[in-house]
Amino acid sequence: MQDEGAPADRELLRRHVAGDADAFGELFRRHRDRLWAVALRTLCDPDEAADALQDAMVSAFRRAADFRGESAVTTWLHRIVVNASLDRLRRRAARPALSTGDEQAFEALVAQDGDPARASDTRLDVDAALRLLPPQQRAALVLVDMLGFSVADTAAILDTSPGTVKSRCARARARLLPHLAHLHGNRSAGQSVSPAQGGDTA
Amino acid sequence: MRGQMTHLDTDVLAEFRAGLITGRRGARITAHLGGCERCTALDEQLAGGRLLLASVPAPAMPDSVARRLDTVLAAEVAHRGAAQGNVARSGAEQKDQAERADGDGAPESPAPRRPGGNRGFRLLTLRVLAPAAAVVVLAAGGYGLSRANLGSSTGSSASAGSAAQGAAPTAAASAKSGGSVNAPNAGPTRGAASRPEGITAAGITVVTGHANLSHADLGQQVRAELNVPASARTTRAATSTERGCVLGLIGHHQLELVESVLYEGSPATLVVARAGARDMAWLAAPDCSATHRHVLDTTSLPSGISGP
């Protein structure tokens, strides 16, 4: 959280570009917890997330002069982190099991992260469920629903259109529903609706 | 049944709530929700899912990651400062460094002090301590020394020492072992003499040390190791695995010390490199190599400060 009277993000970035040795550190520390959350939840792996965040930090440090001010600095930072994270996911695409998602994979992941009987551990269940999503859907959902970014800012971060962000989020929410329903007590209702029945008819 | 709608599909309802379905179709969905308990329940579930996701606290960044990022950032800052300083570096200094690089083992005079992050280009020291238990590598500062130089061994390209501002003197002691040269070092001393020989054509020299380091006050412990007179050290040549690990850790920064140590009671290698106004230190696990960066702990030492 930025202290009252503390220099704005843009000012810190300007100072960094001008040669201030401390400005970037202050800027990055100001946002790094949220940047970490994005990297971790996008990659679902702490080691990979740390590597991605380090890559992103170094990239932002070196490319600060390229920042054109068309978005908020924090949006720019998140974009770099998300890109670094998605790049890593692309590189490990040979391991698709965690992105295709099915009930069996979900149960396996829950078991891996903790005893399924401890379903009260919301964070673990949510983390496991997130792994079932394709990376692009996961990134959009994390930014909008978990970190509170607007659709417009998320579109800027993901370099796509607001409509695509909405679509990705909608599909992600629908996909997660059966895996999260037990956490808010209405699972049976969720399971009662068959996707085959979907659509509207005139 | 004309005009009636079957129950809503989860995807459709999610798209509707995302604002992707509007107009007449949206109006029909709204009307349907007004009279269908089943779909209303599903709609509430979707809303509940969003609330649930929003309620999950963001994971805290582990201290180890925060320290790692701080260390990397310090290196970037130092590198930038050194790069800026390098531009102004004079040809005379380069000549001086080349001459020193040729003077194997000879005592050196303290390197001239440079402002700010402009201490690069001088390889301070490379020390290797003792017992085979652990190895510590300290790389010191300059940026002018490329990784290729470190690796390849052209002693002549590695310039010596760094100047440190403010700091204690360095012992110029250098020990040799295994064919490699040790430079005096730098320890704590940043203004001390430097020798090009820390890294030689034969590779990296490892000080065989006995220190048992721990996470608490790691910076001060590293500083203490840097302060040990070179004359009190014994060294050996680094193995190819150690060499790959060290070069992978220090990147383009100048190696100052590699020392076998104990970390929290287990064998490790201390690697210290100088990055402009800071020293960076890594404690590498025994299995650390060029392709497996296994770091147990890291710290950075601000110039003139005994500890992080």
Image (tube, coloured by chain):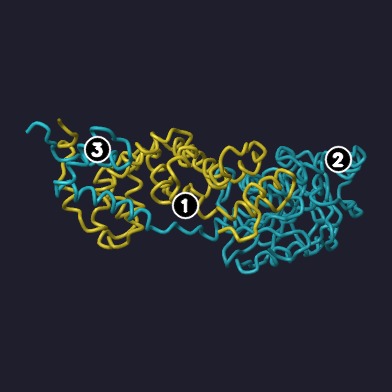
Q: Colour of chain A?
A: yellow
In this rendering, position of residue A33 left or right of residue A100: right
Residue at which label 1 appears: A37
- Mark 1 residue type: Ala
Identify whether B206 is placed above or below A159: below
Quadrant where the image shows the C terminus of chain B: bottom right
Labelled pair 1, 2 in contact (Cβ < 8 Å): no
Alpha-carbon neighbours of circle 3 within 10 Å: few (<14), some, or many (≥20)?
many
Subunit ID for the residue under disc 1: A
For the view shown, which residue lies furthest in the left direction?
Answer: B1
Circle on res. B284: none
Q: Secondary structure at mark 2?
A: loop
Q: Residue at x 45, y 50 (%)?
A: A40
Q: CA distance from mark 1 to mark 3?
A: 29 Å
Q: Are marks 1 and 3 on the same chain?
A: no
- Mark 3 residue type: Val
Subunit ID for the residue under disc 3: B
Q: Secondary structure at mark 3?
A: helix
Subunit ID for the residue under disc 2: B
Circle on res. B88: 2
Which sits in the foreground, B237 or B88? B88
Alpha-carbon neighbours of circle 1 within 10 Å: few (<14), some, or many (≥20)?
many
Give the label, 3 or 2, closer to the camera. Answer: 3
Q: Residue at x 64, y 46 (%)?
A: A10
Q: CA distance from mark 3 to mark 2?
A: 64 Å
Q: Which chain is cyan?
A: B
Identify whether A12 is placed above or below B173: above
Alpha-carbon neighbours of circle 2 within 10 Å: few (<14), some, or many (≥20)?
few
Q: Position of residue A7 (x, y in %)?
A: 66, 54
Residue at which label 3 appears: B12
